[in-house]
Image (cartoon, rainbow, N blue to C red):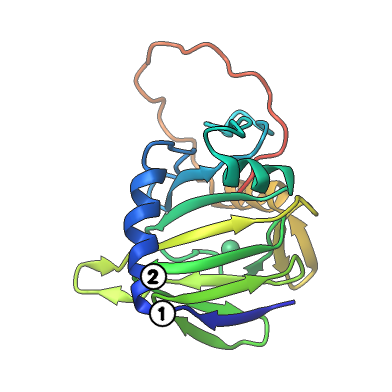
Amino acid sequence: MNFTFRIPQWLTRWLLRSLTARAKRAPYFHLAGYMNRWWLVPYTEAGSVTDIGCGPVSPWRRPLAWVMQRLGFAARIHEILRSDRDRVLHDHPWPYLAIILKGGYYEVTEENSLAWYRPGSVLVRGIEHRHRLMLPTAPFGEQPATTLFITGRYAQKWGFFTPEGKVPYDEYLAAKHVAASPVKPAPKPPQKKRRPARPAGKEQRP
Ligand SMILES: [Fe+2]
């Protein structure tokens, strides 16, 4: 169920103005240097310690958001700051719909195709869809993109598609970390004030 269509520029501009202003009131967990994220319709409950700003919304104050939550949808604004770094493709835990509001990106899919999506593009993607995103190059680095990102019900643990098959995201990232660690031990960092340990969470959502 993967398809793409376009909405008019005036509607794209209106969504950008109205939704980003609304979303900035409810930050989600930002992925430093990669993606900033704000809630429009949060998850009804936190699934991990990084699920900031989750909880049920009021049916009286936000009826549309309430209906979306009941149907299993969540929505947020994404500001994508850099391309996906892994050459292998990944999938997502839910089906989703993304509307490009500002900037744009290339989507690389398993057919080895590269497609450009500009403001007004609406991408509907099923859970079987695999991809990686690339931002266009600007004079001083990559040009960020802003999207409205709507997710459906949780369906699977997401992961990366290596030549050996799908590897769950936590195993893949942990293995990458080990592979990237220096042979020579790094010097100890300066002592910092200790923070209280965070409680162990469940699966981290991308
Ligand atoms: Fe992705």
Q: Nearer the viewer, residue 32 or 47?
A: 47
How many numbered badges does the structure rendering display? 2
- Residue 145: in sight, yes or no? no
Residue 25, above or below 167:
above
Q: Residue at x 50, y 64 (%)?
A: 84
Horizontally, residue 68 falls left or right of residue 32, namely right
The kind of secondary structure element at disc 1 is loop
Q: Is mark 1 within 8 Å of ligand 1?
A: no
Q: Quadrant of the N terminus?
A: bottom right
In the picture, the disc for residue 90 is none
**Among the 4 quarters of the image, the one containing residue 129:** bottom right
Q: Secondary structure at mark 2?
A: helix
Badge 2 is on which residue? 12
- In the displayed structure, does residue 158 sit left or right of residue 121? right
Q: Residue at x 43, y 36 (%)?
A: 26
Residue type, numbered disc 1? Pro
Quadrant hosting residue 51? top right
Determine which residue is flagged by label 1. Answer: 8
Which residue is rendered at x = 64% and y = 44% of the image? 205
- Check disc 1: other Cα within 10 Å, few if <14, some if 14-19, many if 20+: few
Indicate the position of residue 109 as horizontal and vertical percent values. 62, 80
Which of the four quarters of the rendered structure image does ligand 1 lie in?
A: bottom right
Direction left: furthest residue: 139
Of residues 42 and 49, the one nearer the viewer is: 42
Q: Nearer the viewer, residue 50 or 160?
A: 50
Q: CA distance from mark 1 to mark 2?
A: 6 Å
Circles 1, 2 touching at the beta carbon (< 8 Å): yes
